[in-house]
Image (tube, grey):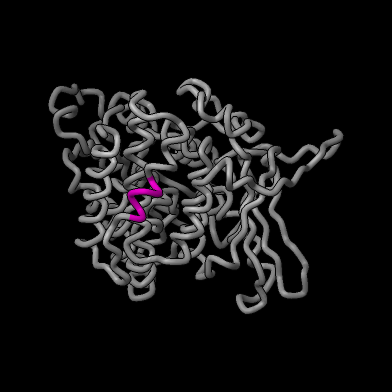
Amino acid sequence: MNPKRISILGATGSIGQSTLDVVRQTDGLSVYAISGHSRLDMLVEAAKEFQPKYLVATCESTAGAFDFSGVPDGTEVLIGQSHVDEIASDPEVDVVVAAIVGVAGLPGTMAAVKAGKTVALANKETLVVAGQLITDLAAKSGSKILPVDSEHSAIFQALQAGKPGEVSRLILTASGGPFRDFSSQDLKTVTVEQALAHPTWQMGDKISIDSATMMNKALEVIEARWLFGMPADQIEVVVHPQSIIHSMVEFVDHSTVAQLSPPDMRLPIQYALSWPDRIAGVSPKLDLSRPQTLEFIPPNVDRFPALALGFEVAARGGTSGAVLNAANESAVAAFLNRELSFTDIASACRQILEQHEFIANPNLEQLMACDQWARQELNRWISV
């Protein structure tokens, strides 16, 4: 049997690097194409090891000053964002790993879905911004969207214990981030360094801040709404500090099925790449030989108001996801630049969300216009 050929969009990020490690340790997988933005030295090292057909450097200015002489002879170097769409829709590709962070990942993911590819989706912003468009497109093309986020992968696995009509609730677990025990007053003085120090996961700066504000969970609620076709009022969040239960599904008979494993992103990545099969794992086993306690704590939306925004946007749909995502991306960047306080991130997002001109059934052009408007509004919010 020929190996599955994989295009990795965002190969130099944490998900991309974990994907390469899964391929490194798993038979039957090969890297067909890789893309990266600025860390081109990492991209070249990956090309040397995995010998892909294509290497895409999306940032033209960075690529123009970079020495690609280390790229192996069999790998073609392509420069420019447009080539991401090409490696996402290439007829030779079996699975596209969509791991570009932020709304920048939307075009490549959309190209893969249009082409009917199996998409291992790590870019939650795709469904947050354009959930209706993407799911409609997948229904037409036959594209299969498989979740890579540990929480959505857990739900995807647990859903196989019953029929769609038997599902009562989706329960997303959250680590609670580094500030789950902070008071509202403590949160006002949170520093960038504190917010980047996640207690469980090693992630990029933006995702670490989202975890600290619980905006990541808000975005995951929206993503779950589209990924599983579940209304917002049948999705819940519970804080689970140990990050062993990655999420749960409750069925109509009140049976709850959970997926458990040590926190390691290679497991959901490998499952998405090997689906519908399960193969020998590359991530560690759950060690039940030592005593452990699993805690479940209701989230405090007063201290973490970003979470409430996620449920509101999941229920409303339309352009609200694009606005929330763009406002948050800009607010997080401002916080990292020390232009905005930690607690102002959610406040700014709410104000901008409430001010925008809502469109119930937007097209892609309207969504992108809302994205740009929200970013401009955030900049105005900072300067006031």
Give above or below for 58 relative to 324: above
Is residue 90 placed above or below 100 in the rendered structure? Answer: below
Q: Is residue 264 above or below residue 358?
A: above
Q: Quadrant of residue 79?
A: top left
Could you tell me residue 85's position as x and y percent?
A: 24, 53
Q: Quadrant of the C terminus?
A: top left
The residue lying toward the viewer, choosing from 46 and 252, is: 252
Numbered range of the magenta stretch: 349-354
- Residue at left offset 46%, top offset 62%: 314
Judge whether residue 339 is colored magenta. Answer: no
Closer to the camera in the image, 206 or 313 = 313
59 left or right of 341 in image: left
Secondary structure mostly seen in the magenta stretch = helix
Residue at the (58%, 40%) spot, across then down:
303
Residue 80 shows in this picture: yes
Q: Is residue 163 left or right of residue 59?
A: right
Residue drawn at point x = 60 percent, y = 75 percent: 164
Q: Pick whichever, 352 or 111, lies toward us.
A: 352
Q: Is residue 75 visible?
A: no
Query: Toward the viewer: 232 or 266?
Result: 232
